């Protein structure tokens, strides 16, 4: 799904950025450009960022066991 139409940023790109270490909208904006034009995607991008960080946090304990 395309989240940011202005910059052609998909949900997948946001997940990849989080997996690469992004933890905030500032970092997503700097790294991907999401939300830096009209800003209409900010709310959706924040939701995806939050979900991605939560998913990563849930997987972290499993990584320690493996
Ligand atoms: S849709 Fe993301 S900046 Fe316009």
Image (cartoon, rainbow, N blue to C red):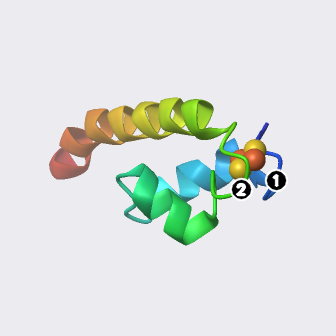
The image position of residue 1, as x and y in percent, is 79, 36
Q: Residue tagged by mark 2?
A: 37
In the picture, the disc for residue 6 is: 1
Q: Residues within 10 Å of mark 2 (few under 14, many from 20)?
A: few
Outermost residue on the front side: it is 38
Label 1 or label 2, whichever comes before in sequence order: 1
Q: Are marks 1 and 2 in contact (CB under 8 Å)?
A: yes
Task: Tell me if the residue at label 1 has its CB under 8 Å from ligand 1.
Answer: yes
Q: Can the viewer see residue 19?
A: no
Which mark is in front, 1 or 2?
2
Placement of 33 over or under 44, stated as above or below: below
Which residue is at a point 31% across and 39% down the rendered structure image? Answer: 59
Task: Give the Cα distance between marks 1 and 2.
Answer: 7 Å
Q: Can you tell which quarter of the image residue 60 is in? A: top left
For ligand 1, tell me if the residue under mark 2 lies within 8 Å. Answer: yes
Q: Is residue 14 left or right of residue 58?
A: right
Rendered residue at 17%/46% (across/down): 65
Q: Which secondary structure, mark 2?
A: loop
Q: In the visual, does 37 lie left or right of 17?
A: right
Which element carries disc 1, helix, strand or loop? loop
Q: Position of residue 16 (x, y in %)?
A: 56, 57
Q: Residue 62 in the image: state x and y as whole percent.
A: 24, 40
Q: Which mark is residue 27?
A: none
User: Do we see residue 52 in this rendering?
Assistant: yes
Residue plotted at (65% across, 44% down): 39
């Amino acid at each position: 799904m395309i989240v940011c139409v202005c910059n052609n940023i998909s949900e997948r790109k946001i997940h990849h950025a989080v997996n690469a270490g992004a933890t905030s909208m500032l970092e997503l904006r700097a790294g991907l450009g999401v939300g830096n034009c009209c800003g209409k995607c900010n709310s959706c991008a924040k939701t995806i960022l939050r979900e991605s960080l939560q998913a990563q946090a849930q997987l972290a304990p499993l990584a320690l066991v493996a």
